[in-house]
């Protein structure tokens, strides 16, 4: 305690010594404060105390007054009262105030140095004793514009408090020219309204789905506004703020330090700067104010918190440095130097990425998605077990984000989009739907599914590098296999025609038989050498008539032809009938065998667009729909027009509905969708096929808010997965290995349904008829052979088995081409008893054959 008391006494003695012995002159500085200048008061007291304690020439006093912010007359009276004091005022320091102009004018008129620490509009007015420690307005606006450009914000919102703030933003507003062809303004300008509640304005900005905000307001208003922004969910990870307000306390400290140092310097040079009282109603001016102000403008400060100081002739500060500080990392990321109007970036892209990843690792990342196999589906739980969080889902998207999260090192949780859409602009609600809407409304930091990277979506959100490349293709149903009809060759004629034709064949044969018997021309001389024969013969028995009509209709002809006029007339009419029927059958047979190929078939978009029987459609609101709607290619324009005009609607809510419509039993419908999804569907749905090649090339990517700082890290993770083959493994896993239904073999090979070749099934009946006919012929041949053996045994008086043996031996000897009228039989094979029996049998058989011949010839 004794030591502390001694130190206090020594300090008091030192201060008293400085005050009474060393200080040669007392100097008063005028300070004009406004409401809320508490921080500046602390800087004032600490600085003057330090100067009075350690400096030896001047003892500084302050005359602090508070001025009105709205009454210029009252503010001028306050300043005049300060200048009329008996001790005089060496200089006046004025903080930011709406009445600044009148104060500046009074001090400049009476040549009293007036120092400002707040922004003022650009001026070319000559002010010898007035200068500002705040950066010159045009240079400051240029610096802000360079900083914004370095941030590479594609779009942003400017929030300003007063009209002066809008002037400060003039160079930033010129950046709008960088996106003249954009469909939407990339710079929005909003002014803070009166009062302290700005939540309605912040909600409007939130609905505008903008993440980058430039806030220009008073320093004391920054924290309340940010707190309200937090309440509106505008202070999340992907929101970026640029605060343009400079700390006025620092400028006030630099101004006060520069002022006191200049006074001490003049004291050492023994130049008197003793202030004199000034009456505002008289023409007296400060005796040394002009010289003092000129000295302060030329003097280089030894120490300055706000950087280098240099003023032009009008009192504008033209040398200063602006440091851009990342508040979260408490790190200077860029410096702007007014001396050469250059911006120097301190943080490299790697540093920026590292900081973004670090911030991402601190939160639970919300991932927006939608149900759609194989990208995401509900996981089947064990009986009685309830699943929560990510355990509820599985699929390609889940595994992809898991792999990315393992590389980057963040935690995530999947959430489904409420409207179950991918994301499109809703003209009625004036907002984006689906996954894109979740990103813009700050409900998610990432969005992943079979989300296509499109130009429209790219204008409002960012995408990672593609994790899957694909194209639009056509899904169509395979031709159904019809039942095999081996008798398809009968189809050209109806059953009644076949019956009528067969009946007519028999009738014509009988009619021809009677005509041939009646006409004299068909009775011929059996012995041409005998000119006067006693008998004539007619070869047109019923057997030959049947053969002639059959040969005619089979287009094979006959070796015998009629000679009578009436018989030839009848045969000619039958030939004419046979010609028409045979030609009609041949023509119809070709049509029936190829009728399947006459059905509407498609081999691509061009063929699909030129027909009207097969309808076609897309997912409503998807990227495929946007492709046809915005395409300039004539074929796709025609297809889009047809889709719009078709009733009932050909647009489906999702891919599953489109696939089911293609599979409908009687549905003539084709569905246009991404090729990767078609691969997934036809892997197990064997009745479907992909038609033609891809119509375009597109990609799937992970979506995130615009200008997301972690985009680079996600791109590197996807590239790593691609190079390692993990992306291909994931596709095989969910497209093939995880499928419950059996895979279709050669599902990617289209059937050659339009081939010109005829299959066996088409002509199998002809082979069947041929086989049956040959079989009957063979049986008849066997019957004739056995009947002939019977005849030989009767004629030659042999047993039936002896005759059979002889005939078989002869028939099997293929080298013999001539046959004896009577077979060669060994004598040992005959006997008298047998001969008598044979004779009786021969007489009986011969009598039977003669009777049969008489019946066939119908001889009287």
Image (cartoon, rainbow, N blue to C red):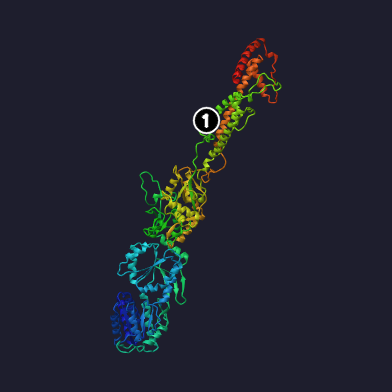
Q: Quadrant of residue 239?
A: bottom left
**Relative to 124, is 762 on the left or the right?**
right
Q: Secondary structure at mark 1?
A: helix
Q: Position of residue 547 (x, y in %)?
A: 60, 27
Q: Position of residue 681 (x, y in %)?
A: 47, 47
Asked whether residue 730 is in view, the answer is no
Name the quarter where the C terminus is drawn. Answer: top right
Q: Nearer the viewer, residue 654 or 25?
A: 654
Above or below, 791 relative to 252:
above
**How would you rate the neighbour count of disc 1 (Cα within 10 Å): few for under 14, some for 14-19, many for 20 or more?**
few
Q: Nearer the viewer, residue 681 or 633?
A: 633
Q: How many marks?
A: 1
Q: Which residue is mark 1?
A: 500
Above or below, 248 relative to 515:
below
Asked whether residue 538 is in view, the answer is yes
Q: Nearer the viewer, residue 822 or 692?
A: 822
Q: Position of residue 56 (x, y in %)?
A: 36, 85
**Relative to 793, is 264 on the left or the right?**
left
Q: Position of residue 787 (x, y in %)?
A: 62, 19
Q: Nearer the viewer, residue 542 or 233?
A: 542
Name the quarter where the N terminus is drawn. Answer: bottom left
Q: Which residue is the extreme one toward the right? A: 529
Q: Quadrant of residue 160?
A: bottom left
């Amino acid at each position: 305690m004794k030591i502390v008391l001694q130190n206090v006494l020594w300090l008091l003695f030192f201060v008293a010594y400085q005050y009474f012995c060393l200080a040669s002159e007392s100097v008063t500085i005028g300070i004009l404060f406004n409401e809320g200048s508490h921080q500046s008061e602390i800087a004032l007291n600490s600085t003057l105390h330090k100067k009075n304690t350690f400096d030896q020439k001047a003892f500084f006093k302050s005359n602090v007054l508070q001025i009105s912010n709205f009454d210029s007359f009252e503010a001028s009276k306050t300043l005049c009262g300060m200048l009329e004091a008996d001790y005089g005022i060496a200089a006046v320091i004025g903080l930011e105030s709406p009445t600044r102009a009148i104060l500046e004018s009074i001090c400049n008129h009476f040549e009293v140095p007036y120092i400002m620490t707040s922004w003022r509009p650009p001026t070319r007015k000559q002010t010898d004793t007035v200068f500002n420690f705040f950066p010159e307005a045009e240079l400051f606006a240029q610096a802000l514009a360079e900083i914004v450009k370095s941030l590479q914000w594609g779009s942003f919102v400017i929030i300003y408090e007063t009209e002066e703030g809008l002037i400060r933003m003039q160079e930033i507003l010129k950046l709008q020219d960088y996106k003249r062809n954009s469909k939407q303004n990339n710079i929005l300008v909003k002014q803070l309204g009166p009062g302290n509640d700005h939540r309605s304005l912040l909600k409007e900005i939130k609905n505008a789905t903008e993440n980058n905000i430039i806030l220009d307001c008073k320093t004391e208003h920054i924290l309340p506004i940010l707190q309200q922004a937090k309440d509106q969910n505008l202070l999340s990870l992907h929101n970026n703020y640029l605060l343009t307000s400079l700390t006025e306390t620092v400028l006030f400290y630099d101004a006060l330090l520069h002022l006191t140092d200049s006074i001490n310097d003049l004291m050492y040079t023994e130049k008197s700067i003793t202030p004199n009282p000034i009456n505002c109603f008289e023409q007296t001016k400060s005796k040394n104010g002009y010289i003092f102000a000129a000295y302060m403008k030329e003097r280089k400060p030894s120490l300055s918190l706000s950087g280098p100081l240099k003023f032009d002739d009008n009192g504008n500060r033209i040398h200063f440095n602006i440091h851009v500080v990342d508040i979260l990392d408490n790190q200077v990321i860029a410096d702007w130097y007014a001396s050469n109007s250059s911006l120097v970036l301190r943080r490299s892209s790697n540093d920026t990425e590292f900081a973004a990843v670090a911030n991402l690792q601190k939160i639970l990342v919300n991932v927006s998605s939608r149900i759609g196999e194989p990208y995401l589906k509900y996981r089947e739980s064990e009986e009685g077990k309830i699943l929560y969080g990510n355990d509820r889902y599985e699929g390609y998207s889940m595994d992809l984000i898991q792999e990315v999260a393992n590389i980057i090192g963040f935690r995530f949780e999947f959430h489904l989009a409420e409207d179950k859409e991918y994301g499109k602009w809703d003209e009625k609600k004036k907002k984006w739907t689906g996954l894109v809407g979740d990103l813009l409304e700050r409900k998610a930091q990432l969005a992943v599914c079979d989300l296509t990277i499109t130009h429209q979506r790219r204008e409002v959100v960012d995408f990672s590098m593609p994790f899957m490349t694909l194209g639009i293709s056509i899904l169509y149903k395979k031709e159904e296999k019809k039942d095999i009809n081996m008798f398809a060759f009968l189809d050209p004629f109806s059953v009644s025609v076949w019956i009528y034709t067969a009946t007519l064949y028999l009738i014509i044969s009988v009619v021809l038989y009677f005509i041939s018997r009646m006409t004299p021309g068909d009775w011929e001389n059996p012995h041409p050498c005998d000119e006067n024969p006693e008998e004539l013969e007619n070869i047109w028995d019923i057997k030959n008539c049947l053969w002639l009509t059959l040969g005619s209709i089979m287009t094979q002809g006959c070796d015998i032809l009629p000679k009578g006029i009436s018989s030839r007339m009848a045969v000619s009419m039958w030939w004419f009938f046979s010609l028409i029927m045979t030609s009609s059958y041949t023509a119809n047979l070709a049509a029936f065998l190829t009728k399947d190929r006459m059905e509407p078939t498609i081999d691509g978009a061009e063929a699909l667009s030129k027909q009207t029987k097969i309808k076609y459609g897309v997912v409503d609101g998807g990227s495929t729909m946007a492709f046809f709607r915005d395409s300039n290619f004539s074929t796709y324009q025609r297809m889009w027009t047809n889709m719009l005009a078709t009733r009932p609607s050909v647009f489906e809510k999702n891919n599953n509905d489109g696939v089911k419509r293609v599979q409908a039993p009687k549905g003539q419908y084709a569905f246009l969708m991404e090729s990767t999804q078609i691969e997934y569907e036809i892997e197990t749905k064997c009745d479907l096929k992909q038609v033609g090649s891809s119509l375009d090339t597109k990609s799937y990517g992970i979506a995130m808010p615009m200008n997301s700082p972690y985009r680079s890290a996600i791109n590197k993770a996807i590239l790593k997965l691609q190079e390692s083959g993990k992306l291909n493994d994931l596709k095989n896993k969910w497209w093939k290995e995880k499928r419950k239904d059996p895979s279709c073999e050669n599902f990617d090979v289209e059937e050659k349904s339009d081939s010109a070749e005829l299959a066996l099934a088409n002509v199998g009946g002809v082979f069947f008829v041929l086989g049956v006919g040959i079989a009957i012929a063979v049986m008849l041949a066997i019957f004739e052979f056995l009947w002939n053996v019977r005849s030989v045994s009767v004629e030659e008086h042999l047993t039936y088995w002896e005759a059979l043996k002889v005939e078989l031996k002869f028939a099997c000897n293929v080298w013999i081409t001539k046959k004896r009228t009577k077979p060669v039989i060994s004598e040992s094979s005959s006997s008298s008893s047998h001969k008598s029996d044979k004779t009786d049998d021969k007489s009986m058989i011969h009598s039977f054959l003669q009777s049969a011949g008489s019946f066939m010839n119908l001889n009287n």
